[in-house]
Amino acid sequence: MQHDVFITGATGYMGRRLGETLLARGHRVRGLVRTGSENRLGRGVEPVVGDALRAETFASALTPHDTLVHLVGTPHPSPWKADEFRRVDLPSILASVSACRERGVGHLVYVSVPQPSPVMKAYVAVRAEGEAAIRAAGLTATVIRPLYVLGPGHRWPLMLLPFYGVAERIPSMRAGALRLGLVTLDQMISTLVRAVENPPALGTTRIVSAPEIRSGGA
């Protein structure tokens, strides 16, 4: 079955790869871009010019048949980027929620973060507010919760793998270590594709955590 997919953050770390993967699987894909960035989209992705922080600039491009995949976010999040989380990450998901509600979009996919999490409190708080906005709007949604996505240019957490290996063998730490575990870019793309192709029940929010991302569930 072909899906109509609208991606915010379509030129980014996950967005470009996701767009090309969905196209290869026979879906129609549009990407939200600023003027002048159209050539940064994956080959074959249809550009929609607008501002991800302002729903009124792209809402008219959406239909009830769409799946909106929200991938806008601060690159390489870190504790000292708290202001940027508030300036970019939160307004962008609120704009997507508003646009989805206005246009009756069928399915919203949101990349969040494990809740709760012991690191980057400001980042976690903003993502929690994004999730709360989705629930308050009553949207049909999939919320995907990786802590960190390993891939090109995003590999520094590999040094933590020995810690994860030990923690997963300690009964009292195992659940937390699995929930906060690292995932790869390939695993995230596969999870996002499955989320698009298999939406949850109408009006519900499905949560996909790190163990499910690694095992292929969505």
Image (cartoon, rainbow, N blue to C red):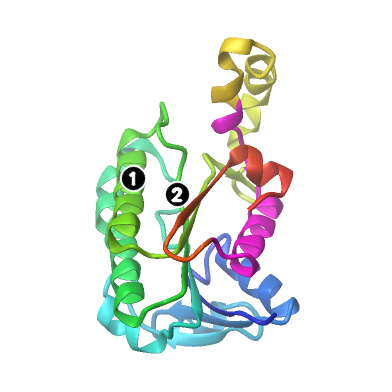
Can residue 69 be seen here?
yes
Give the vertical position of 50 relative to 146 (above or below).
below
Residue position for label 2:
112
User: Relative to 202, is 18 on the left or the right?
Assistant: right
Q: Which residues are magenta?
A: 178-200
User: Relative to 181, is 190 on the left or the right?
Assistant: right
Q: Say which of 54 and 142 sits in front.
A: 142
Q: Amino acid at mark 1?
A: Ala
Q: CA distance from mark 1 to mark 2?
A: 8 Å
Residue at (25% x, 52% y) in the render: 86
Q: Amino acid at mark 2?
A: Ser
Does the magenta segment cover residue 185? yes
Residue position for label 1:
128
Rendering coords of residue 157 (x, y %) = 59, 33
Q: Say which of 153 and 63 sits in front.
A: 63
The quadrant in which the N terminus is found is bottom right
Residue at (50% x, 79% y) in the render: 66
Total number of numbered labels?
Answer: 2
Does the magenta segment cover residue 130? no
Rendering coords of residue 180 (x, y %) = 54, 31
Instruction: Mark 2: give few (<14), some (14-19) or many (20+) Cα within 10 Å.
Output: many
